[in-house]
Amino acid sequence: MTFRLLIAPALLCLALAACGPDKPRVGKRLDTPQEAVSRIGDITVRANLVPTASLNEGVARSYGIERGDRRLMLLVSVRQGPDGLETALPATITATVANLHGQRETLAMREIRSGDYIDYVGATEVSPPDTLTFDLKIVREGGAASTMRFSRDFSPQ
C-alpha cells in the first residue's frame, strides 16, 4: 500500500477533530470504512468521501469544490498495476447518489490532473441522519466499463 493511501484517513480524522464543538458537523459512523475499493484484474478503482469542511481553502479551490458543513466531496481514482507502482488511467466517471428518501442526484464529476495523477471529483450534500448510496459507472479509455456501488451512513454529532 502506498504511503498516500495509509495517511489519508489519519489526516481526515485530524481535520475533523479540529472542528469546534459548537459547529454542526457531518458525522460518519466509525464502523464503516472510509474508502470503497474495486479491483478488476490489475485495475483498481478507489472512491473516497471527504467532508468539504475539512478541506483547506486552497485545496477546495483547486478541486473546484465549495466548502460546507453538510457537503461531501466524492474523490475517485482509477489506477493500473500493483500497489505502490500503479499508474493513473484516464476514464469517464458517471456518479449518482441516492438518500433514504429515494431522492437521486447525478453528480457532476470533473477530472483533476496533478503531475502523473488523475483523479475525478464531484460534490453532494447530506442531512444527517441519512444513508447515501453511490452508484459509479467507470469507462476507461478504450471502452472497458465497470460499475461500483457503496453506501455510507451519516449521523449527527
Image (tube, helix red, strand yellow):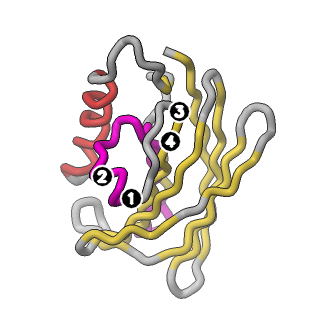
| Residue that sits furthest to the bottom in the current view | 142
In the image: residue 3, left or right of residue 33: left
> Which residue position holds label 1?
63
> Which residue position holds label 3?
70
Q: Nearer the observer, disc 4 or disc 2?
A: 2
Question: How much space separates mark 4 and mark 3, taking CA atoms?
Answer: 7 Å
Residue 109 visible? The answer is yes
> Helix, strand or loop at disc 3?
loop
> Which residue position holds label 4?
72
Give me the residue at 56% from left, 20% from top: 155
Residues in magenta? 39-62
Closer-to-camera residue (134/73): 73
> Helix, strand or loop at disc 4?
strand
Could you tell me residue 141's position as x and y percent? 50, 83
Could you tell me residue 100's position as x and y percent? 74, 32
Question: How much space separates mark 3 and mark 2, taking CA atoms?
Answer: 17 Å
| Residue that sits furthest to the left in the current view | 3
CB within 8 Å, label 2 to label 1 = yes
Q: Earlier in the sequence, mark 3 or mark 2?
A: 2
- As drawn, the label of residue 59 is 2
Q: Amino acid at mark 4?
A: Leu
Residue 31 visible? The answer is no
Q: Earlier in the sequence, mark 1 or mark 3?
A: 1
- Density class for disc 1 (Cα within 10 Å; few <14, some 14-19, many ≥20) is some
| Residue that sits furthest to the right in the current view | 102
Question: How much space separates mark 1 and mark 3, taking CA atoms?
Answer: 17 Å
> Helix, strand or loop at disc 2?
helix
| Residue that sits furthest to the top in the current view | 21
